[in-house]
Image (cartoon, helix red, strand yellow):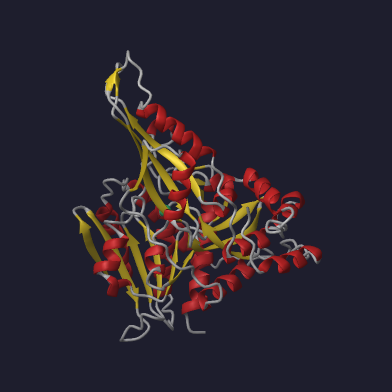
Amino acid sequence: MLRLKSLVPMLLLAGLFAAPQLPAQTAQAPMPSQAMIQLGNEATNWLQDLIRINTTNPPGNELAAAKYIGAILDKEGIHYEIFETAPGRGFIVARLSSTPVPDPARALLLMGHLDVVGVDRSKWTVDPFGGVINGGYLYGRGAVDDKAMTIANLATLIELKRTNAHLNRDVIFLAEPDEEDGGTQGMQVIVDKYWDKIAAGFAINESGQVAMKDGKVQYVGVQVSEKVAANVDVVAKGTSGHASIPLKDNPIAHLAAAITKISAYEPPAEFDSVTRAYFETLSNVEDEDTAKWMKVLETPDRGDHAARIISDENPVWAAMIHNTISPTILEAGVRRNVIPAEAKAVLNIRLLPGDSLEVTLAKLTSLVNDPEISFSIEPGTSEPAPSSSVTSDLYQAITHVAATEFPGAPVTPYLSTGATDSSFLRERNVQAYGLLPFPLTEADRLTMHADNERIPLDSFHKGIDFLYTVVSDFAVEK
Ligand SMILES: [Zn+2]
């Protein structure tokens, strides 16, 4: 069932008077200056070095990476501070000031995380911590997520300093630990204990995308909100006994039945202003058949069918318009010949902004309809945060720079299915935007968290150029 709101008549009209296709990318993007080419080459070395510092989380050991960045800032004469959030873990923060007394409401925070997810070395064709360059790609864990972003932020800060840019707001650089494991030893500590070091009205962080398709940038997605993550334990309790005497309340059987019912559940498609704008923009750049369905996602007669087709076409789109439930862990049994007293599963639930976990759990409880099964929410559920504005000066700067850098590619707000450290900022009313600035194909994007993570070097350089231009547009006096 669709959630029909007052926008439906407008969308129906939009369907009747279909928006014209955007012009092809005929205009040329500006060529990078010699200084930016040199900066890009330096940044490649920094990224290689940073990949070589293994910050797999846990344990993270991000302090070594923070110190490495500190040494680069030393050479540039940029003051910085490093703080430990836990033994061996910490963050680095540096600031280019625009005024003697900081004005946090105007400041721009450039942030990236230092930790990375683990690797299965046997599946990699190169050393994941070698910083290997091959065939125009830089390989390594963190090559995209998120060391490339951290280095792009660093390069931007350094170029502002080298050019003596006349700033109209402070630009703050932050590289933080523990993003990949929830931020309890990272962003949570930073916002609780060191807020004055990073206080800003605006932020640019990871997520979002400069989406490449068929050799050109298709669109620029700016992450303005994200789904809320929760882990829920599903526990079945029964009678323990000898496996030779089967019991009707066997918790493994009850849990398996419950998980089967939960997995078959299809939550309704839901849209908010962000996903509405996203699909509307995409309907102008996607192939005709896909676009046709995107345009009718919220119509009463064809909406359900359209949502199903879009969801089947791309699991990311499916996750953007539904609350999702992924069973991720099963635990049961102690001996082959013993019926256990308990069986447990973990559900990783991702809710659309504004939806309630209690309502979802009530739905699952009635669906499972088994008194032997109970649900309990694990601690650490992320807090819902408000969306960032699509009319702020920073969002407009991104739109306007993207029009020059990627002619013909529209900019759209984007809801990310994954969680980022931006939620900590949005809870404090920071206008935070996910703008991973590197033009990447879906295939390259999917190497994040996967084997053989890699970034094309020309995309890395282009992304630095794009980010630097956005920051200059927003923070440098003209
Ligand atoms: Zn990341």
Nearer the observer, 37 or 120: 120
Q: Is residue 276 above or below residue 394?
A: above
Q: Residue 76: percent from the left, percent from the top?
A: 33, 69
View extreme (right): residue: 16
Q: Residue 39: percent from the left, percent from the top?
A: 45, 63
The answer, for residue 117, to whether it is visible in the render is no
Q: Is residue 472 above or below residue 311?
A: below
Q: Residue 422: percent from the left, percent from the top?
A: 41, 63
View extreme (bottom): residue: 100
Q: Residue at x 28, y 29 (%)?
A: 341
Q: Residue at x 28, y 75 (%)?
A: 196
- Quarter of the rendering containing residue 383: bottom left
In-image side of 33 versus 15 (left or right): left
Q: Is residue 434 above or below residue 363?
A: below
In-image side of 426 versus 23 (left or right): left
Nearer the observer, 257 or 433: 257
The answer, for residue 271, to whether it is visible in the render is yes
- Quarter of the rendering containing residue 146: bottom left
Q: Residue at x 29, y 72 (%)?
A: 195
Q: Residue 285: percent from the left, percent from the top?
A: 70, 57
View extreme (top): residue: 244
Q: Residue at x 56, y 76 (%)?
A: 391
